[in-house]
Amino acid sequence: MIEVKELTKQFGQFTAVDKISFDVKPGEIFAFLGPNGAGKTTTIKMLTTLTHPSSGSMRLNGYDPVKNPTEARQSFGIVFQDPSLDDELTAMENMEFHAVLYGISKAERKKRIESLLNFVELWDRRNDLAKTFSGGMRRRLEIARGLLHHPKILFLDEPTLGLDPQTRNHIWSYAVKLSRDEGMTVFFTTHYMEEAEQNADRIAIIDHGQIVAMGTSEDLRNQTNKATLEEAFIELTGSEIREEQASSMDQMRMRRRAWSNKKII
Amino acid sequence: MNAIYILWLRQLIRYFRSKSRIIGSLAQPLLFLIALGFGFGPIYTKAGGGNYIQFLVPGIVGMSIMFTAVFMGIEMIWDRKFGFLKETMVAPVSRFSIMLGRILGGATVATLQGVLVMIISIFVGFRLDNWFLVIPAVVVMFLIALIFTTLGTAIASIMEDMQGFQLIINFLIMPMFFLSGALFPLTGLPPAVTAIALIDPLSYGVDALRGILLGASHISMPLNIVVSLGVWAILLGIGSILFAKMEA
Ligand SMILES: Nc1ncnc2c1ncn2[C@@H]1O[C@H](COP(=O)(O)OP(=O)(O)O)[C@@H](O)[C@H]1O
Ligand SMILES: [Mg+2]
């Protein structure tokens, strides 16, 4: 369902993603783990047509995101690392906007929006502006929106960052249920190892733009002779703190998160 | 087609929802109308120019449209900063449709703003012989709005953040306003000033508005329209290249 070969992204001299290759099977839940700045978001951006790769090839649902962006875009839904709702629109309007952009017919639109908003438990709040929502509610709305057009693949880039355990559990139960019931492929990143442990069929670990290990959680633990995935992860990626490597982009992102509820105009 | 419509609708919903912004943005044109209209009116009349308010209103309408339109275009930077732009960029829709939807939405809002200014101007003494003239005037207003929303969108496609915004306003938009003939007649000026006015796209839009509303223009009406359409086409061409290259 997702095929990646020798995929590379350079920003000037700096190589953010360095010749990575992997395949994700249909219906598989695939975790993409790595420290800050490892290249996870950049990989997702290339797969989802937001940025062009420097070299290498990709296939999503059989389509090349570079050559056939429209077909590739129709195939996936995404929850971005950063917030992406229109705060000045209601939950309903955010959903309708998406439905029209993806060419969903009017009759289907109504049913689908209602069932998805019920699914993420936001139906009662459908007429409230997105800016009045808590972080967890926004995330759930983004998930419902990403699922609206029946994507074959769902990308989740740190979907649970900064959320309480209850909300995190909720979000994973939605994703896993859809994957099991509808055969949807899920590609996600997270910093919470237990989320990968519990939900992922397979895990890839990326560091400094390169994949350093790939397999089931058990494979990774056996390979490193460690008892937990967390220990295996640290063994594979080293224990130094990556905060200093967090680029200005990352810092801006953190600030943006703090701001996202504030209006500037 | 539907994508263009929904992007247009989004801008309108946002506009009507921000009442304080609508009212706030009427303050500046009102100030210009009162200060300049009443301040310079007597001198203008004494010099044989006729009623200055009549002359000034199309200029101030053009000004409000230009400022609103540029802002509506540049606002895309916020959509990029706060993430919403990505939602449109991963949709199965061509980049050109996305840009066009945004431009049409922004231009509609700017035109509405221009109509509001025209209504306000009645209170400072603006009169029309025939109110049906408002219909062709709105068409010209929309054309002005298209030009400057497209300009704002093109600028926003290459601007990283809002830091350059003041620069754009002070070194591009302000000069375009003051040198366009919005405030003074284009006749009898030093040749250098005339030359500058004639490379300023706002001059043609404002002159066309005067031609329609007052029946008097300094530039021929067909030329006003052809130049305005031409400028828009060029900006749309440049804008769509920049927009397509942009990474959200
Ligand atoms: N637009 C950009 N220009 C320059 N460097 C970038 C850009 N985007 C990301 N990077 C750099 O690429 C590296 C990988 O970033 P990213 O993919 O966001 O990491 P992750 O999502 O794994 O935390 C980081 O060092 C980051 O600073
Ligand atoms: Mg990231």
Image (tube, grey):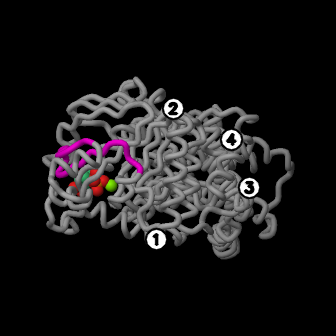
Which x, y percent locates residue B235?
47, 39
Label 1 chain ID? A
User: Looking at numbered disc 2 in the image, what kind of residue is underneath it?
Assistant: Gln
User: Looking at numbered disc 1 in the image, what kind of residue is underneath it?
Assistant: Trp
Assign the magenta stretch its main secondary structure.
strand
Mark 1 or mark 2: whose residue is earlier in sequence: 2
Provide the residue designation for mark 3: B115
Q: Residue at x 21, y 61 (%)?
A: A231
The answer for how far apart the CA atoms under marks 3 and 1 are is 35 Å
Label 3 chain ID? B
Provide the residue designation for mark 4: A112
Determine whether the residue tagged by mark 4 lies in a helix, strand or loop: helix
Q: Residue at x 47, y 55 (%)?
A: B83
The answer for how far apart the CA atoms under marks 3 and 4 are is 39 Å
Determine whether the residue tagged by mark 1 lies in a helix, strand or loop: helix
Which x, y percent locates residue A68?
41, 25
What's the mark number on residue A259? 1
Q: Are marks 2 and 3 in contact (CB under 8 Å)?
A: no
**What range is drawn magenta here?**
A199-215
User: Looking at numbered disc 3 in the image, what kind of residue is underneath it?
Assistant: Val
Mark 4 or mark 2: whose residue is earlier in sequence: 2
Mark 3 vs mark 1, foreground winner is 1
Provide the residue designation for mark 2: A74
